[in-house]
Amino acid sequence: MRIGIPKETLSEEKRVALAPAGVDLLVKSGHTVFIEQDAGLGSHFTNQDYINVGATIVYSTEEVFQRSELITKVTPLTDEVADMLQENQILFSFLHLSVGRKNIIDKLIEKNVTAISYELIEKNGALPVLQSISEIAGQLAIKVGGRYLCSDTPNGRGILLGGIPGVAPAAVVILGAGVVGFSAARAAFGRGAQVIVFDKDLRRLRRIENFISKNITTVVATPLTIARGVKFADLFIGAVQVKGEKTPSIVTEEMVKTMKKGAVIVDISIDQGGCVETSYPTTISNPVFIKHNVTHYCVPNVPALVARTASYGITNASIEYIKDIADNGLSNSLLGDIGLTKGVCTYNGTCSNEIIAETFGLEYRRLHVFSTN
C-alpha cells in the first residue's frame, strides 16, 4: 500500500504522524511511504532519517495526497487539506469532527473517504491512541499551570506548587479522573502540591488512591462539590472527556467569578469544546487570557509542546492499525477489529458515526463491511 505523511499545516504544530521507526516497519513489510519534505523537522527527525528507513521524500502536500492510498496525520482537517483528499482514500488523524465544521464532513462523504478518528479507536475498554496523547497532556497541564502561577507572569499569583516548610503548597483541583486527570494528579502530587480530584465514577477515584496515594483527596463530582472545589483552587485542571461528543461546560462563569485572583485554569478539554464556560481556544505562542482575574490556558494541541515525545507516542499507538490495513486491506482489518470500527466516522460515502450524524443532521448508516478474501 502507498502511505502518505503530510507536513502538518496548523500554526506552531511540530508533531509528525509517524516517526522513522514506524516508517521502517511499513517499508520492511513491502509498503511505500511518501513523506513531505521537512515534515519531521519540528520533532527533530531529518529528511535523511526517513530516507535511511526507505521513505520517499516528496516536495508538496498536494503530491503526498495524490500519490497515497492512506494518509496519516495528526491534527484535524482544515478546508485546504480536506480539498486535497482523493477519492476512496483512507485517512487516519485526530479529527474531532463533532466540534468541527459540517463542510469538512460533507467533503469526506462526497469523496468516499474512510475517515478514522484516532480519538475514537477502542481497545480493551480504552482509547489507545488518545491515551498516549492524554498522558502527555496531563503532565503538561501541571507544568504550564505551575508556570502561570509564578509572579513573573501577567496576573501571576506567586505560588510555588510544592510550597516550603511552614508555607502551604498550591491547591491543585482536577475535574476528571480519566487518563488526563490521572496523569495530572500524579504529576502534581509528585511536585508536592495539595491535590483534589473530582469525578462521578468511584472506580476512577479509587484508582487514584490505589495507584498514586491516599493522600490525594478524591471527591464525587456534583454541581455543589465542583463549585466548592473551583473556589478553593489555585490551579484548576479541566480534564473532562465525553467520547466523540462536545464537552459540556461543567464549570460555569459564575463559578469562575468565585476563584482567587491570579488563579489559573488549564482547560485540557478545549480540543472538544472545553469544560469551562469562559474558555476559548488559544495558541502555543499566545496561550493565555485573563477573565474575571483568572488566567485561562486553553491550547488545543498542548502535546505539541513536546513534539518529539508526542510523535513517538502517536507512532507507537497507531502503527499496528496502519500496518494491519496496509498488510490485509481495509475491509479485512475492520472485520477483524471491532475497536477499530469504532473510529470510523465516514465510510463508503456515508456518515458511520451516530453522534456526528445527529450533531449535523446527516443520514446515519451503520458500518457494513464485507470481506475481500
Image (tube, helix red, strand yellow):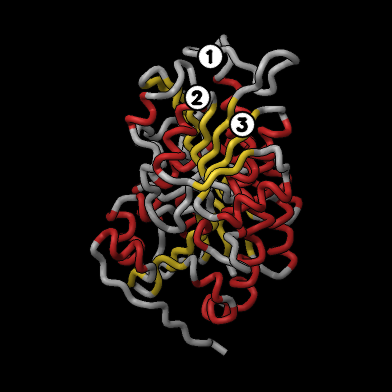
Query: Residue 363 falls in which quadrant of the image?
Result: bottom left
Element marked by disc 2: strand
Going from N to C along the chain, the mark reached first, 1 or 3, is 3
- Residue assigned mark 3: 142
- Establish if 373 lies above or below 283: below
Q: Dot 2: within a 10 Å radius of its alpha carbon, few (fewer than 14), some, or many (20 or more) residues? A: many
Look at the image and tell me in which quarter the N terminus lies: bottom right
Residue at 51% across, 31% down: 236
Which residue type carries mark 1? Arg
Q: Nearer the viewer, residue 9 or 178?
A: 178
Which residue type carries mark 2? Val
Element marked by disc 3: helix
* Residue 264: image tag: 2
Q: Nearer the viewer, residue 71 or 351?
A: 351
Residue at 49% across, 39% down: 238
Asked if residue 274 shows in the view, the reply is no
How far apart are labels 1 and 3 at the CA level?
A: 15 Å
Q: Nearer the viewer, residue 319 or 100?
A: 100
Look at the image and tell me in which quarter the C terminus lies: bottom right
* Residue 157: image tag: 1
Q: Is the C-beta separation of discs 1 and 3 under 8 Å?
A: no
Counting from the top left corner in percent of width and height, residue 274 is at: 41, 41
Q: Dot 3: within a 10 Å radius of its alpha carbon, few (fewer than 14), some, or many (20 or more) residues? A: many
Q: Is the C-beta separation of discs 1 and 2 under 8 Å?
A: yes
Element marked by disc 1: loop
* Residue 44: image tag: none
How far apart are labels 1 and 2 at the CA level?
A: 9 Å
- Establish if 95 lies above or below 368: above
Left or right of 163, for residue 340: left
Which residue type carries mark 3? Ile
- Establish if 178 lies above or below 31: above
How far apart are labels 2 and 3 at the CA level?
A: 10 Å
